[in-house]
Amino acid sequence: MTSNEIRSTFLAFMKERGHTVVPSASLVPENDPSVLFTTAGMQPLVPYLMGQPHPSGSRRITNSQKCVRTNDIEEVGDNTHLTFFEMLGNWSLGDYFKKEALEWSFELLTSQEHGFGLDPRRLYVTVFEGNEDAPRDKEAYQIWSDIFTRAGLDPATRIFFMDAEANWWSPGDNGPCGPDSEMFYDVSGKHTEGLTHDAFLQADDAQEVIEIWNDVFMEYEKKDGTIIGKLANQNVDTGSGLERVVGVVQGKDNVYDTDLFARIMAVARTITPALRSQRILSDHLRASVFLIADGVTPSNTDQGYILRRLLRRAILHTESRSMTRETIVAFVDAVIDTYQDAYPEVPDQRSHIIDTIEEELITKFSATLRKGLREFDRMTKETVALSGTDVFTLFSTFGFPLEMTTEVAEERGIAVDTQGFHEEMKKHQEHSRVGSEQKFKGGLADTSEATTRLHTAHHLLLKALQQVLGKHVHQRGSNITADRLRIDFSHPEKVTAEQLHEVERIVNEKIAQNLPVVRSSMPKDEAETLGAEHEFGAKYPDHVSVYSIGPKEASESTPHFSDAFSIEFCGGPHAEHTGELGHFSIKKEEASSAGVRRIKATLR
Ligand code: SER
């Protein structure tokens, strides 16, 4: 099946079951200033999920929604991450509920006649195990159990109960939310015989099974991060990432090998031989075309800044660090050709899109890039570190953004004092610009619960790395989002599988011990004497805050530093006890720059 057939099969299937097909809303949310982009199919439907009648008069809605998410921009280039993607969705606004939603999901995924014809023996599902907010979802379990039994498969090896971290979905701190049921497909082809719960988790960690569909039973309401009760209606919000579904239906192990990217990747191949760069170029240009078509123009704030960043980042991945009008035209036409059936409004904007990219990349940016790189070379001629002031000069005098500096520096194994840069920035009181820069700054992406827990796990991880690999290990960079943590650290060689395993074991042991996390504040010298860990190259004030983890009896009044497992210079925030963290696992270990390794890890 082609991607166009997959999209239209989904919509036709839902239409036959009484859904009104609505067009994709804009990538720029119309009435929601709290988010920059539409990041999920349900987002434009929030008022209707909250009870307002839908303008179509229908209580069953379906579409393929354009979405943009940039929190994982650095993962783009691997097999599955994208900044722009489409989400296939069907919604019940107080109409059908769990039974229909789950039966239809299964039927559409597996039917040979009017669905995607996927092998049911490669399907696995999760359901919500229950907590203080809502009971265990026995109903969803029973429905799945009947479905798998009918298909001749043992439900006990197919359906797994999971906690709220995995199986509770809400668009943010406010609005509709509820337990969900996720469907996973075995892309390895190794797991047709069923799995135990543990084996399923391992297969998920190894990306042997990947999530392709999510049915959310939205009957609860969240306010300021707390679930305050039930909504008037029982709603269903189902979402399925088109690119991933196309990947599994077309039997590919990565989204770039699907027909959605065939034309676009063909253009990318003409401008760089590096596969990861081809993928980044394809992703970023595709996203840019759709953003411009939805009215975004490059600027230094909000949506415009993200577009500028995507375009400028793309150019860094061309071999010549430049782009001609011809290349731009080739990219834009490849995107338009691929999407003209699904999004016929995009071709109307062809020349506006081409001109916008040309002005940003050729008229405005090539000169900036050339001058900035020249200055960068000059600054790093006799040193392998860039100070905060240097980075700030590159930014303020040469218009060279921080991310650009860190990206080039990473490639060349040069350390960058980003903290010093931010201090300089503050001094110069460039408030509006700081706002945009922070959307991509290192460190913590936000202070949500999930990010905070990962932040605490980050401290445990650094200490465990030092115990397993040696005292030479120090932090060289860090980035934490709600989904994963990333740490860069000094170590001269690849970390072996056994070492990674041991590091994971130590971190999970410390989590199981439920150690207290204690904040203290003290003069910088005193913290240094305690041996508190700090980031290389970072500048700290004379009085610092320090977080220590353990021992069991530690508290703010009596921190027991000498028996602590970890002590770090840090501004927080952190979990109160390690027991809140969940199961820690390392997803990836790779080189970051010369003598620096990078680990990505998650909690679930
Ligand atoms: N809102 C859910 C998601 O984004 C399902 O559509 O996963």
Image (cartoon, rainbow, N blue to C red):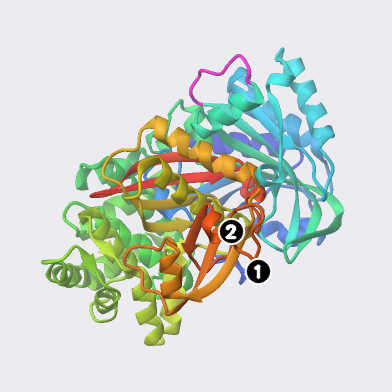
Task: Give the residue number, with chain letter if any, for mark 1.
Answer: 557
Q: Residue at x 41, y 30 (%)?
A: 498
Which one is in front, 139 or 405?
A: 405
Given the image, on which type of amino acid does mark 2 rest? Thr
Extent of the magenta region: 187-195
- Which tag is nearer the camera, tag 2 or tag 1? 1
- Residue 82 drawn at (x, y percent): 45, 48
* Above or below: residue 451 compared with residue 358: above
Task: Give the residue number, with chain letter if any, for mark 2.
Answer: 452
- Asked whether residue 334 appears in the rendered view, the answer is no
Does the stretch in magenta take in 191?
yes
* Mark 1 surroundings: few (<14), some (14-19) or many (≥20) residues within 10 A: few
Which one is in front, 235 or 277?
A: 277
Given the image, on which type of amino acid does mark 1 rest? Ser
- Mark 2 to mark 1: distance in Å? 23 Å
Q: Which residue is drawn at 41% across and 67% down?
A: 528
Which one is in front, 36 or 336?
A: 36
Q: Is mark 2 on a helix, strand or loop?
A: helix
Q: Is mark 2 within 8 Å of ligand 1?
A: no
On screen, residue 378 versus residue 495, left or right, reads left
- Residue 504 drawn at (x, y percent): 50, 38
- Residue 355 drawn at (x, y percent): 31, 66
